[in-house]
Amino acid sequence: MGFSTATEVHAQRQGIATISTGAQELDKLLDGPHEFTFPPDRLSFEFCVPLGGIETGSITELYGEFRTGKTQLCHQLAVTCQLGFDQGGGCGRCLYIDTEGTFRPERCIAIAERFASVHSDTYCCVLLCLTVDGQI
């Protein structure tokens, strides 16, 4: 690890995609009012302008009151991260780290069925990490 020039950091940030939350207004709040565009002859990630949402390659913390939609948003992102770039996804996979035992695969299946290109057999690897307090 060392120092990086602004040019190097800028080049690294060009490879960051954003994952849509599924709510356009929330995406705008998280990343500003960008339009998702492709040059007519290219449909690949390196030529697109991100739509807004949660950045890849970073850690995003969600916090809030009980029953405010934090887990629902995580389930939504677990599906949308697997969508194509043209649909606001990241063409990736999901590792869902569950520290409270709240992951519900049936929610992901219902969300996936909303998108035509993602089938109900979405791939989510779930890691259940309960603390000692959570197991009592």
Image (tube, rainbow, N blue to C red):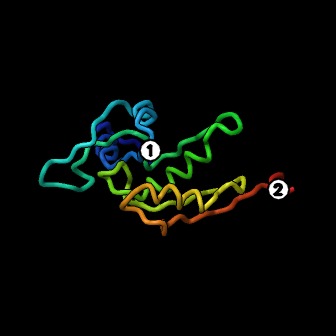
Question: Closer to the camera, 107 or 32?
Answer: 107
Q: Which amino acid type is shown beneath numbered disc 1?
A: Gly
| Helix, strand or loop under label 2 | helix
Seen from this angle, which residue lies furthest bottom? 121
Q: Which amino acid type is shown beneath numbered disc 2?
A: Val
Q: Position of residue 59 (x, y in %)?
A: 53, 45
Which of the 4 image quadrants contains residue 25? top left
* Mark sitting earlier along the chain (2/1): 1
Which labelled disc corresponds to residue 52? none
Give the residue number, with chain letter if any, for mark 1: 22
Query: Does residue 134 appear to the left or right of 46 in the view shown?
Result: right
Seen from this angle, which residue lies furthest right? 136
Q: Residue at x 41, y 60 (%)?
A: 92
Q: From mark 2 to mark 1, how far is it between C-alphas?
A: 34 Å
Query: Does residue 127 appear to the left or right of 36 in the view shown?
Result: right
Q: Position of residue 29 (x, y in %)?
A: 44, 30
Query: How would you rate the neighbour count of disc 1 (Cα within 10 Å): few for under 14, some for 14-19, many for 20 or more?
Result: some
Say if 15 sits above or below 96 in the image: above
User: Which corner quadrant holds the C terminus?
Assistant: bottom right
| Helix, strand or loop under label 1 | loop
Give the residue number, with chain letter if any, for mark 2: 132
CB atoms of marks 2 and 1 within 8 Å:
no
